[in-house]
Image (cartoon, coloured by chain):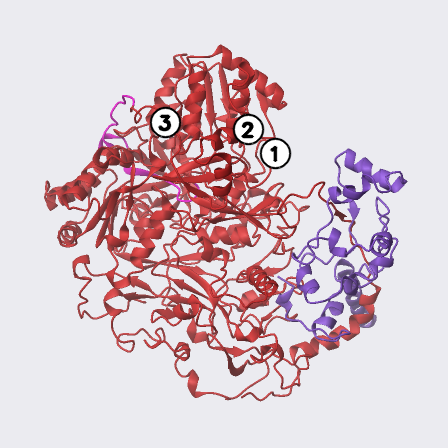
Chain colours: A red, B purple
Amino acid sequence: MSTETPGVKRRDFLKVIGAGTATATAIGCSSEKVEKLIPYLVSPDETVPGVSTYYATTCRECSAGCGLIAETRDGRTIKLEGNPAHPVNRGALCARGQAALQGLYNPDRFRGPMVRNGSSFKQVTWDEALNIFSQKLGSSRGGAVFINQHESGSFPAFLDGWLASNGMAPHISYDGESDSAAIAANRQSFGVAWPRLDFSSARLIVSFGADFLDSWGAAVPQQLDFADARAKLQGAPRMIYIGPRRSLTGLNADVWIPCNPGSEIAIARLLAGTATVAQAASASGAEPAALTALVKEYQAAKPGMVLAGGSGSRGQELALAVNALNQTAGNVGVTIRPAEALLGFERQASTAEIAALVSRMNSGSVSMLMVRGANPANALPQSAGFAAAMAKVPFKVSFSSVPDETTAVADLILPDHHFLEQWGDAEPVRGTLSLQQPTMDPVFDTRATSDVLIAAANKVRAGSYPADYRTWLTSRFPGGAAGHSSALGKGIAAGSATALAGTARAVPQIAAAPAIAQTRGDFYLMVYPHPVLGSRGANKPWLQELPDPVTKTCWQTVAEMHPKTAAQLGVENGDLVKVETDAGSITVPALLYIGVMPGTIAVAAGRGRRNSGRYASAGANAYDILPAAFDASGGLALVSTRARVSKAGGHAQIVTTEGSSRQHGRGIGKAIYAADLGRSADAHAPAGAQADAGGHAKSNAPPGEENSPGHHTFVGDASHEFLPGLRSPVANDAQGDFGDPKSKEKGMYDPKHWSGMANRRWAMTVDLARCTGCSACVTACYSENNIPTVGADWQGAKVFPDRTGFGANILRSREMAWLRIERYFEGGEDGGADFDTRFVPMLCQHCGNAPCEPVCPVYATYHAPDGLNVQVYNRCVGTRYCSNNCPYKVRYFNWFGYGEPNRPQYAFPEPLNWQLNPDVTVRGKGVMEKCSFCVQRIREAENRAKGEGRDLIPNEFSTACAEACPSRAITFGDAADDRWTVAQLAKDKRAYHVFEELNTFTAVVYLKKVLHNEPASSVTAPVAAPAVGGAH
Amino acid sequence: MRKKWLAVPGFFALAALATIVSAYSAASSSQGNSPVQPIKFPHPIHVQTLKMNCVYCHFAANKSPDPGMPAMSTCMGCHTVAGAQKPEIQKLAAYWNKKEPVPWVRIHKVPEYVHFPHMRHVNAGVSCQTCHGQVQNMAQVQQQESLNMGWCVNCHIGRSNPPLKARYDCATCHY
């Protein structure tokens, strides 16, 4: 029971002020600008304005071929989600897939076809462009080369058929991102390029630099399977990561064995029993004790799974050795499943083929070069001289729809549709076709390359092809055009794509790369593919602004080095260093990271692009310092050289969103040892973190809280009556139906109120045992909630000379990410390799007793009866008191009006603004904003239920972050209704609230990470080892 | 010493100015606004004489947050024949022949930070006229009601006639 203490309440005070100004307000008159209501000419069938239509299609951002559901509103695609029916991604979607929308609406996309005019391009009509194209086709048979982005499905066969009819050689299907060495080895060992990795069946995962959670292979299905495996908690596989740098995958491993770049093969030999620990340790630089433990555990834990990546110049040798290990141990068919292979990686050409093309072009034997969806000029290191060789080709056609290094030297640009604008298909797994259909009309005057090729062929010989590619495609579909149409709804169909003629591609002869130890330099150089940018993400501001999951830097290229290496060089965090190899040099700031082997410098590739758009030039290009060396499979060796590193003088601020990499004992990301899971809650329970096993909602209460009902109340204090669901007090602003503060009524805050709002408690659980820190949720949130990116160089203030350029606003903590992934290290303070990482998705906790609410002088933030901490943008006057008072620092202030088109800081230059979600207000300048628990989705679901005359169905909808999450770590729903999954999970014995001691009664419940600190063989039988503060 | 006496009224003057400016920039109303449309569309003839239902043209009002504007093809469905000789219809036909939509001037508009789901109101029995006025009598549509928040909330808390009630939590409309 609560007793209201008389006193002036915040609202009464405001009413007095309000009365004084009411007369003044009445003088205000309308200044609305004239807006138009533009009707359709003819209304499209089956669409309702203001209601989304959903199209199933296929993602083409990498080779995996995930299924998409594209939400399209009033003719514009506004959100991408994973297709739950799709066998590859099962409803999840990575950050790169989400950001495909920024490829579709990229402001730097070509508006139409263009032809070279001196040093620039001039716009031409499609007719003119097609005439030029077909003329050149006729005159350059034989020596023509077509490079296409690697993709599965029918298009490659269509393209080869078209090339053959023009007397041209089959195309080069190029994917610069996948691991050629692993693919070649898999083909040799198992007959498939990419077997399915069944992490759940394994007891032990040993990864030699195979970053299966970053971008190695098919990231989404691998992450789904890995998270499912780790969710087995006590029965989960343990993971050991061996490599020079702890990548995101490495950070998810239980043990990291650092070794010198390119020396992994020595450790693989150790596991195979053909080398001794001493030999392996001296060859790799790894700790002998760690290697001894590795061998012991590897031999005991069955079944295991050994993976190899890392793209060194001996990559294929390593991958073959690892495959042999799997075969010897009987893992093939158990944890490594060639029978369920992913087909997306079959038949791709190697980078060496592109390199071989350089000499062919230089010798003048290439008469015409056609490039679609690939960017060979940046797929090879600059030292390979692709662009210069391209200049020797008489005629270069680019089908790219965005500017890049290759189109910059092209003669004719015939911009392709974005994949969301065109027809196609993929064959991601055997026997399943993933269909691709346009989700909207083309944004610009582009044309699908398939249709351009058909038009060119029909110009020469009328009727040699059907009218368009769609007709060609559907005529081959089982069931024809009608069958195709009916399959489109689901997005997948049984069937196989038109097969390519011929066998797997031959690898051109390549000179063996010199051993890394023989190259010049004092430090090993490790170039690694950026986990989210990939090769085509640099001009997408969402991906540029998404902090790297490992380093938490954005908009910037850094040289990562171990603190010991930095001390040796005499540099500190942010000091500029010059990294020099025989291929070239770059000057970038140093970033101290304990996850890099001492003596190694790691640089991410993907930034510093040239001629690739307004956002892409941020950072430096790691390919500038990479020699063109290849492994035996023809893959580009990213680890092949040593480098000279020197202090360059000067300092640059590190563009990071991280406050501290340490928890400082705050217990934000908590963990529990696997062995402790089976024990009763009171034994070894870290203070205030565990509920009892019975799982009563009451047990979420912090200690001591139960003893003080109806204790002292004071003005502004929440009533200590509790609402249903997670324990949360009745909001201090709860008032009667007519807003009478003296009323004893609680209005809508009364669970018995007719609206029933207070019967719900929207809540979220985040399972840290599943979360890998991949950050797909962050991009999903940007996409759903119209969050502006702020890091472009023209968006920053120009006042501070050291704080300009890309990321200037981030340096001043002005990023707007409603949801961020905090990454904390535990241990390793001495620079050792034995540290553990906690990834904590941090968003508004929707506190039941929120510190932000009582300090708002204008009632812009308050607690809604259904448990939401609401931010009312139109009430907000920007005092920022709430942000100041938020212990979680999840409130973001819109400093510059990023959503206002006439400001230089505008974050959505046309047509990026086409993506904006019409259900979410685009916030203006001077307004505080934060996670809303996707309130627009709650309202949409409530509206739908009301329209259908029913109640909400448990788990009927979810937030954008939860929908996207490829590790299924996030669950959203109504914690007051036990039928919702979230209500069950919130009672899990691993559940805890961040900063529970503050009595914030948060609606976001975290489930502790599970630490597998004991060797895998003994995990099944938990031993009674003392639990030593895993949480701190 | 004189400064002190200037400061107090000066402060009030500033406060009043700030209030006027803030009132000018937001929360104002276009009540009474009745712009001239590119084509004189007479609601009375369509609704009263021809007995057409509102949702014949505003076809999504009962199933979408957006009421829907009739496509040009809906207009031309009748007006290819009906009244084809009248000057206003000829204007319409001219747009149609050029394949251009009619740029109607928007009258009823709530700010971007307000989400007004038409279907919830229509399906709850709120008549179109409650918010839009007696459109069936308006030769030229005029904004009858203020569409200000207080006007909305009045119904939401059950002070309308007949009394209806709906949630009045801020996040019902503002998000």
Q: Nearer the viewer, mark 3 or mark 1?
A: 3
> What's the residue type where badge 2 is placed?
Pro
Which residue is at 25% across, 63% downward?
A234
Q: Is residue A91 magenta?
A: no
Chain letter for mark 2: A
Span of residues in magenta:
A508-533
- For the residues beneath circles 3 and 1, the answer to whether they share a chain is yes
Relative side of A685 to A822, left or right: left
Looking at the picture, how far across and down is residue B18, in whole percent?
Answer: 76, 63
Q: Which residue is mark 1?
A: A444
The residue that appears at 37% across and 32% down in the rendered structure is A625
Q: How many marks?
A: 3
Q: CA distance from mark 3 to mark 2?
A: 25 Å
The spot of residue A961 in percent (x, y) is 47, 56
Above or below, B37 relative to A316: below
The residue mark sitting in front, 3 or 2, is 3
Q: Say which amino acid is labelled 3.
A: Leu
* Real-space CA distance between mark 3 and mark 1, rounded to the nearest whole angstrom: 32 Å
Q: Label 2: which residue?
A: A415
Residue at label 3? A500
Quarter of the picture holding the C terminus of chain A: bottom left
